[in-house]
Image (tube, grey):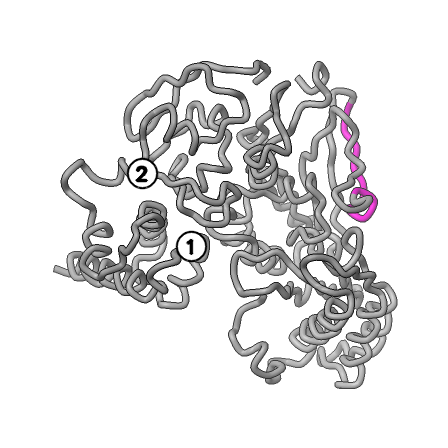
Amino acid sequence: MRSDSDNYTLHVNGADREVTDSWLGESLLDVLRDRLGLLGSKGACEQGECGSCSVLVDGELVCSCLVMAAGAVGQTVVTIEGVAPAGSPSDVQSAFVEAGAVQCGFCTPGLIMAVHDLLERSPSPTETEIREELAGNVCRCTGYGRIIDAVHQVSVTRSAGRST
Amino acid sequence: MLVDEPQATLLCGGTDVMVEVNDGHRRPDRSVMMVNRIAELRSWSHDPAAGTLTIGAAVTYSELMQEPLSALLPALAEAARTVGSPQIRNAGTLGGNLGTCSPAGDGLPVLAAADAVVELASASGRRSMPVAAFMLGVKRTALQPGELVVSVTLPVARGWQGYAKVGVRNAMVIAVASACLVVDEPSRRLGMALGSVGPTVLRCPEAERELAAAVDWEFGTVEPAALRRFGELAASESRPITDHRSTAEYRRHAVRVLAQRLARRAFANGATPDGATDGSGRSA
């Protein structure tokens, strides 16, 4: 990558999206929000501390603020807009609503991404494990109790679904 | 490409470089070389005959935490687990840790304690050097323009090894002080390295020698007085400063505690760990 600005294609939520006149150092978060109109991923700390910009790149949960967008060419990006079809929330999204795990909502998209990723890797996490795994997603409203409740709820519902 | 533009920014996981870019401290408007998808850098290999493991520069902390790497190098897995969050560990790499060369880099005390060898490559060839010679100072390395870190090679664990770290909280935290102890049973030698308490990662040769001499190698035990002495020596071999994260005095005290804790875990045959500060069962 040598030029000041660049045109490239990103594969986001199952579709190829053209990015034009992006500057080289532009983060994936900025490209998603400002160029592709995907406003679900939030920008706060821009240094990987808060997790509100969490997305999946090639199936790995990462902070999109720390991904150089031009470096994600050829990779598969999934954002909060891609976790469930429009109008039908995922089980994690529904559990957050039911458990009261959403207050101001700013951290919620990042947390939903992180919880989906956690439950893929560990279907029945303990509370300690949930706290460690979600350490990179900061919430300043809830005190985390209801977020942890929501994770437990999904875990229980999914395991009941598997055993029947 | 590095031949044409030796000053190009080398970007691996982005967890250091992109923070600077986002802050406006760095504007990569000339060229950036993404190295995180180069197959050789993404891979690792185990040489059972030599008893060594070679880890590519772009292997992530998440990979280091998982089997089989975590079983071959438990201390590196423990150190990796203390880095940031899952998001950061999925992106951050051992090569990036070396390239940045912060004295607080969590992987570096492990590499130093295990006498790792760093392999570098440029258009004119390859060279390797002990990690101690690679780390020159605060964010200063032996890397020349046009050169990149390819891998590190270090011995597979041949005895107990562990990593311990003090920060201002339990998660998402940079080390105020950190330590790694590597026990090599066949040679009856120890490697003890400290992070965040000097301009770069430090070894503690005196503490290593005295403790190794005090260990009953047949039973793998040591007298409590020797543990205390080990802590004192490690603290005296640290070179901490006072900065915005902590004071030199506190850091020296933390080294004493961490060193004793690691040595107790290594040589106390499962005796009670040291009280409430150590009751979590976590390594950090």
Q: Are marks 2 and 1 in contact (CB under 8 Å)?
A: no
Residue marked by disc 1: A138
Q: Provide residue A15's location: percent of width, then percent of height.
A: 29, 24
Q: What's under tag 1, amino acid-wise? A: Val
Observer-nearest of A150 and B144: A150
Q: What's under tag 2, amino acid-wise? A: Gly
Work out whether A5 lies above or below B196.
above
- Residue drawn 14% across and 39% down? A87
Instruction: Say whether residue B17 is magenta.
Output: no
Q: Provide residue A2's location: percent of width, then percent of height.
A: 59, 15
Q: Earlier in the sequence, mark 2 or mark 1?
A: 2
> Taking the image as drawn, is residue B71 in sight?
no
For label 1, the SS is: loop
Pointer 2 indicates a residue of which chain?
A
Q: Provide residue B253's location: percent of width, then percent of height.
A: 74, 73
Position of B97 with respect to B82 (left or right) is right
**Within-10-Å neighbours for mark 2: few <14, some 14–19, many 20+:** some
Residue marked by disc 2: A40
For label 2, the SS is: loop
The rendered magenta stretch, by its main secondary structure, is classed as strand
Position of B190 with respect to A134 (left or right) is right
- Residue drawn 68% across and 41% down? B100
Instruction: Say whether residue B126 is magenta.
Output: yes
- Magenta range is B125-134
In three-dimensional space, the C-alpha distance between marks 2 and 1, rounded to whole angstroms, equals 16 Å
Instruction: Name the residue at the left extreme.
Output: A164
> Taking the image as drawn, is residue B40 in sight?
yes
Q: Is circle 2 on the same chain as circle 1?
A: yes
Locate the N terminus of chain B and report the quarter of the image it occupies. Answer: top right
